[in-house]
């Protein structure tokens, strides 16, 4: 990033790759370049999705539909959900950090399939532009990110078809990425590195990728059938032609419930990397962490119908899915207590990365509690399709995953750029985000419990004041992005030089120069058998022993 | 207790980094698991429709068995001929390998022609009723897989030519990948045949 001077690698074929800034716009096969492509591309879409959220909260300032027409509100709502899930959270928390870190963690020079990796990334910008352009060309889809029929069949077809095409492309990208991660973790480990010695993020990505490979194709098949209903007037999901809408819901949630874990499991992994480093303690309960991730993967595949308790599901199904969902709280709770135990008694440096991680723990446990509540049929029937669900969902994906994305940026920025981020600005960013987020979404629990339906541009005037509080929180969240943006841009040029390992961390990505050389280590890859071995005094840790040579510092 | 142990480790060998054929087959197999899940979604949809959406009394949905049985035989035989092609490549007999590949491709094309004949003789169309739609969606999606498979077989056939071709006894990966895919497509057909025609 700050370094434009790249020595020519001695690898054959490398001179074909552009160097300097240009490589971030090229079909690069370097996993670090692809990781940054994912991150920056995802962040640009986050700004788009955030602007759409701002439009939603502006509309909801008043009970009547005055800021935009109702059909435009529906389009904005659909785009907000789709952009945030498929173009920001899934690509960044999987693609960006996964691509950057996994090859380091397994001791490899690159991913198992570098070219497939580049293909997976380059599917995303066209798919995203296609999706957003639909708003300007024909009007975007209006049926929400769930695209439930008959709504998706009866709203204007062109926007919906563009939406389907875009999601299919993003799904293909996701599957390619998943195949790559599974092969890299299982097949590309450096000799001598055992599975149970891997940093926790590898396990999280392995679990996530299994979910991606098993569930994303089902969504693809479902959307193909839906597009047949729209274009060819078949009747798969059209009750008027003998079809069945509930089948769509089953197939959709077979992907989209695991999708929640696709968004949050990598975040679990990233937090498990960040906390031990800044607490100077080994990760508590490594083995239980691994087993809980795998338990979440298995259970996550059999809980989908808890989204459908009001869709005429039979009593046995309600019972089964309630119990299965309650069970999933057990491995999640194990992870939660493991993080607390990691923090307990540690020498915590309360920097921005740790603040965001702790913010994640608080928000996520709140979202988890409302999640268990929502899985109980009597309660769910009461609050289904209200703002309570909106609040729960955002506590998981924003309070959970997005907080972790920011924590990870604060943690790994020195490695990626070679420079430190400004710490006071980072704390300001955390404070604004944490207050803004809770101000925006905590009141929505109350709105939902009192019966305000979601996804509607107008509402009962009695809810006006609480909605205005929520919108004020959204404004604060928007403002919180400014110190962050200033921080990452200014620090890239003027930040304090970080050195190779500013956090004195032990995981392999820190045992090389900052930024790392093209082949990750100039020498051979270090064998890290205890990635969390912080249980000894600092002066006894031999950090220099395995450092790769600094190819880059000559250019500074 | 130091955590780092760089000196005792052996260097990552060149084969680890460049000639990773086993990783590629692993990747192909993982992708086929994903592909199988797409079909699983379709099958699940069909079976649910079958269980909860009975055919309307006036709906026409009749399937004849002779042509699909012929199709099943064609695909199963083509799996065997592909296997023969692989055996010959491993022995270094490129010419025999190419002949068996061509037989496999022709069997695949025969399947597609036979499928077309069935489509044109069936008494129902795509939008006639729910089961007609599901029938065409499932067989069509499978037919797309056969079409792609036949094209890939022809590409491998072209690349098996001596001496200019790139698929040889030393570089079997393209043939093995397509072979795995072809067996997978045949396996899907057997499941599809059982569910769609016999159930």
Image: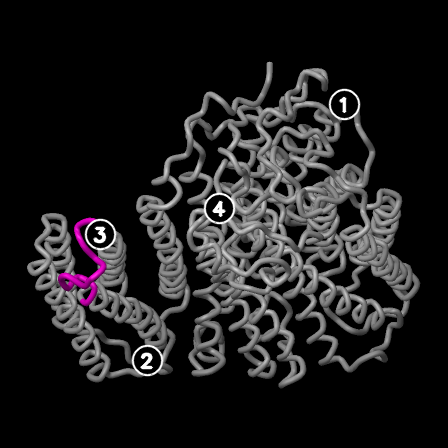
Apparent side of residue A252 relative to residue B46 in the rendered image (left or right): right
Q: Which residue is mark 3?
A: B172
Residue at 49 percent across and 55 percent down: it is: A29
Whether labels 1 and 3 belong to a single chain: the reply is no
Residue stretch rendered in magenta on the structure: B158-170
How far apart are the alpha carbons under marks 1 and 3?
Answer: 54 Å
How far apart are the alpha carbons under marks 4 and 2?
Answer: 56 Å
Q: In the rendered structure, the residue with mark 3 lies on which chain?
A: B
Q: Is residue A405 above or below residue A277?
A: below
Whether labels 1 and 4 belong to a single chain: the reply is yes
Task: Please tell me which of labels 3 and 2 falls first in the chain.
Answer: 2
Badge 2 density bin: few <14, some 14–19, many ≥20, Cα 10 Å: few
**Residue A51 - label:** none
The front one of A486 and A270 is: A486
Apparent side of residue A63 relative to residue A115 in the rendered image (left or right): right
Q: Quadrant of residue A384?
A: bottom right
Q: Which residue is mark 4?
A: A110
Badge 4 density bin: few <14, some 14–19, many ≥20, Cα 10 Å: many
Could you say whether the residue bearing mark 1 is in a helix, strand or loop? loop
Whole-percent x, y for residue B175 in the image: 22, 56
Whole-percent x, y for residue A49 in the image: 72, 65
The front one of A291 and B107 is: B107
User: Is the magenta region chiefly helix, strand or loop?
Assistant: loop
């Amino acid at each position: 990033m700050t370094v434009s001077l790249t020595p020519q690698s001695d690898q054959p074929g490398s001179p074909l790759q552009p160097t300097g800034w240009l490589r971030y716009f090229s079909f690069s096969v370097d996993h670090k370049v692809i990781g940054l492509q994912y991150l920056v591309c995802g962040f640009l879409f986050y700004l788009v999705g955030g602007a759409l959220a701002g439009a939603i909260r502006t509309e909801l300032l008043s009970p009547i539909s005055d800021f935009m027409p109702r059909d435009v509100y529906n389009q904005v709502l659909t785009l907000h959900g789709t952009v945030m899930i498929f173009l920001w959270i899934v690509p960044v928390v999987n693609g960006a950090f996964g691509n950057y870190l996994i090859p380091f963690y397994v001791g490899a020079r690159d991913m198992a399939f570098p070219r497939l990796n580049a293909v997976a990334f380059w599917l995303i910008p066209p798919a995203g532009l296609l999706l957003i352009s639909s708003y300007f060309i024909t009007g975007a889809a209006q049926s929400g990110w769930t695209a439930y029929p008959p709504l998706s069949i009866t709203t204007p077809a062109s926007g919906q078809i563009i939406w389907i095409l875009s999601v299919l492309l993003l799904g293909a990208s996701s599957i390619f990425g998943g195949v790559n991660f599974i092969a890299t973790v299982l097949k590309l480990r450096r000799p001598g590195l055992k599975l149970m010695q891997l940093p926790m993020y590898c396990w999280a990505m392995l679990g996530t990728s299994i979910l991606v490979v098993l569930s994303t194709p089902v969504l693809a098949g479902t959307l193909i059938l839906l597009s047949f209903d729209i274009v060819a007037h078949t009747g798969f999901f059209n009750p008027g032609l003998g079809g069945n809408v509930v089948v769509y819901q089953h197939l959709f949630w077979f992907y989209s419930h695991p999708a929640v874990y696709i968004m949050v499991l990598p975040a679990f992994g990233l937090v498990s990397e960040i906390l031990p480093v800044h607490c100077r303690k080994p990760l508590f309960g490594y083995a239980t962490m691994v087993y809980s991730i795998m338990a979440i993967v298995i259970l996550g595949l059999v809980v989908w119908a808890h989204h459908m308790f009001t869709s005429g599901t039979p009593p046995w199904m309600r019972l089964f899915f309630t119990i299965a969902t309650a069970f999933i709280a057990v491995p999640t709770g194990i992870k939660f207590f493991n993080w607390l135990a990691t923090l307990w008694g540690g020498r915590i440096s309360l920097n921005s990365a740790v603040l965001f991680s702790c913010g994640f723990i608080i928000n996520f446990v709140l979202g988890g509690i409302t999640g268990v509540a929502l899985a109980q049929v009597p309660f769910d029937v009461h609050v289904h399709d209200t703002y309570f669900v909106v609040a729960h969902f955002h506590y998981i994906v924003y309070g959970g995953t997005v907080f972790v994305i920011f924590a990870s940026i604060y943690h790994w920025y020195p490695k990626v750029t070679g420079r430190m981020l400004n710490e006071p600005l980072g704390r300001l960013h955390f404070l604004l985000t944490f207050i803004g987020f809770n101000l925006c979404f905590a009141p929505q629990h109350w709105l939902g419990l009192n019966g305000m339906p979601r996804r509607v541009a107008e509402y009962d005037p009695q809810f006006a004041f609480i909605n205005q509080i929520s919108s004020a929180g959204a404004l604060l969240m928007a403002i919180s992005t400014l110190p962050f943006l200033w921080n990452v841009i200014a620090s890239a040029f003027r930040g304090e030089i970080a050195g190779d390992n500013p956090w004195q961390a032990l995981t392999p990505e820190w045992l090389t120069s900052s930024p790392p050389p093209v082949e990750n280590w100039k020498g051979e890859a270090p064998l890290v058998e205890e990635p969390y071995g912080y249980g000894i005094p600092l002066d006894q840790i031999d950090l220099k022993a395995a450092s790769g040579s600094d190819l880059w510092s000559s250019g500074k | 207790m130091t955590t780092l142990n760089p000196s005792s480790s052996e260097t990552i060998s060149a084969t680890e980094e460049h000639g990773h054929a086993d990783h590629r087959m692993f990747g192909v197999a993982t992708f086929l698991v994903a592909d199988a899940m797409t079909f699983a979604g379709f099958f699940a949809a069909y079976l649910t429709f079958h269980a909860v959406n009975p055919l309307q009394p006036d709906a026409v949905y009749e399937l004849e068995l002779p042509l699909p049985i012929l199709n099943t035989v064609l695909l199963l035989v083509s799996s065997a001929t592909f296997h023969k092609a692989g055996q010959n490549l491993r022995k270094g007999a490129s010419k025999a390998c190419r002949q068996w590949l061509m037989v496999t491709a022709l069997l695949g094309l025969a399947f597609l022609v036979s499928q077309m004949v069935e489509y044109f003789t069936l008494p129902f169309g795509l939008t006639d009723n729910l089961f007609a739609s599901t029938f065409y969606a499932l067989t069509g999606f499978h037919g797309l897989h056969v079409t792609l498979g036949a094209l890939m077989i022809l590409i491998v056939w072209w690349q098996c030519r001596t001496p200019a071709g790139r698929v040889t006894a030393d570089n079997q990966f393209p043939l093995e990948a397509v072979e795995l895919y072809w067996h997978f497509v045949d396996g899907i057909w057997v499941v599809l045949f059982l569910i769609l025609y016999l159930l």
